[in-house]
Image: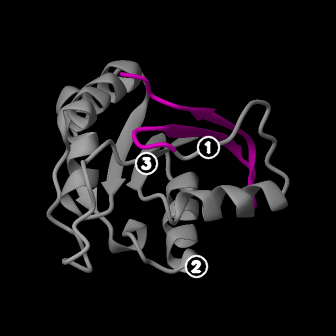
Amino acid sequence: MTVYLVRHASAGTRNHTDPSDRSRILDESGTLQAEQLAGWLRHEDIRRIASSPVRRCVQTVEPLAKVLDLTVTPDERLGEGSDLESAWLALTTAARSRGDSVLCSHGDLIPELISRLRRRGMQVPGRSGCSKGSTWVLQHWNGECFATGLYTPVKV
């Protein structure tokens, strides 16, 4: 079982006048990153895709959902500013599901989730990060933590 934890792709500059910044869309680089993600994961056994409901997150996983004929399920627990316990519940629920899952979230939550997984024993054999459009491939859930987490940045 694998969970792909994706940071939304590039979406230009944050709108500091809008505290929620929910409607910002992917820029040209972000659109390419989303297409690359779909190309990379199109042959995996992904059975569900959940995303922060903000537009840039949904747009990041829509190309993948299209090629897999799946629906993107909005999940507020993956939203920017969500508390860690809610995001943790979204991750562990996906981990307990049958088949692989994709979760798309933000740069404030993903490092916290990875840090918690590492404290619980997850091995990270390579480098770490959380760049826009990147994916953490989290493998082998044992009920408490994942065995390995591989960080994969996306280059366009």
Q: Earlier in the sequence, mark 2 or mark 3?
A: 3
| Label 2 crowd bin: few (<14), some (14–19), many (20+), radius 10 Å | few
**Amino acid type of the residue that numbered disc 2 sits on in the rendered structure:** Glu
Q: Where is residue 3 in the image (x, y as percent from the top left)?
A: 53, 44
Q: Is residue 2 left or right of residue 123?
A: left
Q: Residues within 10 Å of mark 3 (few under 14, many from 20)?
A: many
Report the front residue among 130 and 71.
130
Residue that badge 2 annotates: 85
Magenta residue span:
131-156
Q: Position of residue 81 (x, y in %)?
A: 42, 77
The label on residue 7 is: 3
Nearest to viewer (mark 1 / mark 2): 1
Camera-nearest label, 2 or 3: 3
Left or right of 44, for residue 56:
left
Side of 65 where 126 appears, left or right:
right
Residue 155 drawn in magenta = yes
- Which disc is residue 108 wearing? none
Residue 42 higher or lower than 103, as above or below: above
* Marks 2 and 3 in Cβ contact (< 8 Å): no
Q: Mark 1 points at which residue?
A: 129
Quarter containing the N terminus: top right
